[in-house]
Amino acid sequence: MTMRVNHNLGALLRCYEALYNWRALAMLAGSFVLGGLTISGGVAIAAHTQSEAPAVLLGLLGALIIIVGLNGAGLILVDQAYEQELRSLGAAFFGGIQSALYVIGLGLLLGLGITLVMLFVYLLTLLARIPGMGGFFGFVFAGPLVLVLAAAYAVLALAGPLMVAAVWHGEGFLTSFTRAVAIVLKRPLEVLLHFLVLGVLVLPAAGFLGAIVGAASALVGGFYVSAAAGGDVASVFSGGLSGWVSDFGATAGGAGISMGMVWFLVLSVMSLIYGLGMILVYRSTNEGVGTEVADAVGATLSQFKRKLDEHKPRAVDPRSAPQAPAEAFVPSVPTPQSSAAPQHCSACGSAVSADDVFCGNCGHRLR
């Protein structure tokens, strides 16, 4: 068996080129700021009305805005990675909506898979309740179950970003899932090495930006808190405590929102760099990985659809086909043949339609 050596790790250095993509940065920063303001507004309304419903609804809306912006920026980054003409912000926004739906669905699918694995592990641990045999079953199953659950966590951590990158590349829902899992299963060490290198490239920059912006935010925030607390001390002694508290809250709150927008900008910059890195990792590790699983699932679904169509009842409108009296002689009229010759499967010879992708009889891929 030959070892596949990948020479594309150096390409991950290009992840910092994402900072030159002003369209992706504008899309991402705008979505972070707008989504953050929506979430903050929901929290403020909930605090004023003493109800959690506005916080939950606006929180979900803000999270959706951020997810759409992330996917829209990812589509623009794909154009940059393949040196294509960058799509417009409008096209990226509408494409981001569809990609966001795929990403949310894939996240739910991954979550369901992990839940099933955990349920399987839990059910096997119940064997330890058998009197006199609990220790034996614990010895036999505990170690392998740790490996099974660790493998599931590894697939979740590595395949998740690859699925998102596959969606940005224009793959369908099913293909994105199967291709990402196939990459992780076939090249686990290579995928892990790529993400480790990407983390080494991104984390120091993230730590540096977080440290300097955090220090500056602490100093500026302290100045504003001091100014708000000291400016209205006289009003406290004159009996205006409620007004002082209101002004203090408004000043500190306004400064906090403004500084929060700066943090959203920093977060968008780091997300932009990591997003381009995800695309480069997918592009590097995707080479030579086929879609056998996706084709097999697609063939199965095509056969299932064909069987449903064959057994689906067809309604007949009696007004459209009047019946002739039994005693009347109805001359037979030859049925006109279709001008288009029927197509046949090259594997089994069964008749197929022009728009079929898989043979409904044997599942062979037609095109």
Image (cartoon, helix red, strand yellow):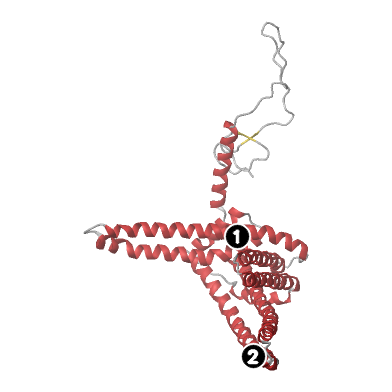
Residue 222 is marked as: 2
Q: Nearer the viewer, residue 252 or 305?
A: 252
Q: Work out whether residue 65 can be spotted.
A: yes
- Indicate the position of residue 169 as horizontal and vertical percent values: 66, 61
Total labels drawn:
2
Name the amino acid, label 1: Ile
Seen at 64% across and 73% down, the residue is: 271
Seen at 38% across and 59% down, the residue is: 121
SS state under label 2:
helix
Seen at 65% across and 27% down, the residue is: 315
Q: Residues within 10 Å of mark 2 (few under 14, many from 20)?
A: few
Q: Is residue 22 left or right of residue 135?
A: right
Residue at mark 1: 104
SS state under label 1:
helix
Q: Quadrant of residue 223?
A: bottom right
- Indicate the position of residue 366 as horizontal and vertical percent values: 62, 42
Q: Which quadrant of the rendered structure holds the C terminus?
A: top right
Residue 312 is marked as: none
Name the amino acid, label 2: Gly
Q: Quadrant of residue 259?
A: bottom right
How far, Cα to Cα, is label 1 from label 2?
39 Å
